Amino acid sequence: MQLNPHLPLVYHPNYSFSFDPNHRFVMSKFAYLYEHVQNLGLINDNLTQPMLGSPEPLELVHCENYIHDLWHNRLDEKAMRRIGLPWSKELMARTFTAPLGTLQTARLALKHGIACHLAGGTHHAHTDFGSGYCMVNDLAFTSETLIKSGEVTNILIFDLDVHQGDGTAAMLTHQPYAYTCSIHCEKNFPFRKTESDIDVGLPLYMEDDDYLEVVDNTLERLLYQFSPDIVLYDAGVDVWEHDALGKLNISWEGIEQRDQLVLKKCLDHGVPVATVIGGGYDKDHDRLARRHAIVVEQAHKIVN
């Protein structure tokens, strides 16, 4: 596999917009992440901007009524409360653009071996409802698009966000060529979990060594057994020991080692890997952006 030394990155300026700075979901993190990666000197002509999104492409995996009601602000109060974000035109623009960004990232990874999306990982969105700050599921959408277009035969979603990827598991349960794996804190949101192909529920406050062993052994087994054409890697950083919603004790260095391990193991097996940033929660927005940048930095080191 010939890796591109200019690591392909995907980002759209509409990912961040003016939003309540005290909200638990840090909407500014995407812009801060872009700025941080730029300051590291990792952005030049390697940046791709996805097209502006709309509901129609997402009809492939989502209930048509649900996504059009979401788009036009017709969901009831209970449905919006379950999502956890206040509706706005700006929110809709970023919500429907980001899945196209993940798809673009996957296609770049197929071409170059590795690519990183500076957003994505909305794994709590289900076919006909949103949940946990997730409205549409970019991982399910990308998987179904690539499989049905014939661009790949099979795909592995390797989800290391601290919260179980319930929406992705539910949406792909009848897709035999998409294999879902979630390694997450068991006693954490969502409290009603949907069964993935492989679920590894971790005990509270697990630390680096045990965590990395689980990640390593699980990924090795999946790559060997499933032989995917591509891995979609949800590099959630809410596993960090000081994350507001984490409940694991993974150090900053542990996250660096995890991302290096996952990326290198995929490439050593000759499998392209596309990364999304997943979850992360912190009142220090700059620190959160630096945490999300870990996977980009590790990817850059590998291709160089």
Image (spheres, grey):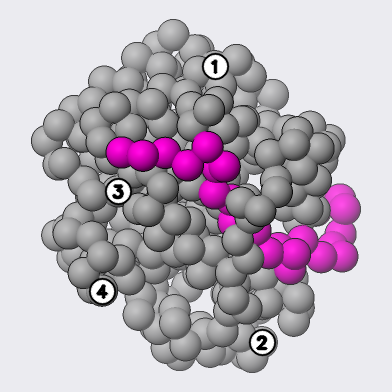
Name the N-terminal-most of marks 2 and 3: 2
Residue designated by label 4: 149
Q: How many C-alpha atoms fall within 10 Å of the one at disc 2: few (<14), some, or many (≥20)?
A: some
Q: Which residues are magenta?
A: 1-26
Closer to the observer: label 2 or label 3?
3
Instruction: Give left or right: position of 248 versus 284.
Output: left
Counting residues from the N terminus, which is met first, the one under dot 1 or under dot 3? 3
* Eye-nearest disc, 2 or 1: 1
Q: Crowding near pointer 4: few (<14 within 10 Å), some, many (20+)? A: few
Magenta: main secondary structure equals loop
The reply to whether the C-beta atoms of the residues labelled 4 and 1 are less than 8 Å apart is no
Residue indicated by mark 1: 254
The foreground one among 240 and 38 is 38
Question: Foreground mark, 1 or 3?
Answer: 3
- How many neighbours does mark 3 have within 10 angstroms: few (below 14), some (14-19), or many (20 or more)? many
Under circle 4, the secondary element is loop
Q: What amino acid type is highlighted by mark number 3?
A: Ile
Q: Position of residue 181 (x, y in %)?
A: 30, 42
Q: Which residue is mark 2?
A: 73
Tell whether label 4 touches label 3 (CB within 8 Å): no
Closest to the camera, between mark 4 and mark 1, is 4
Q: Judge left or right: residue 94 versus residue 6.
A: right
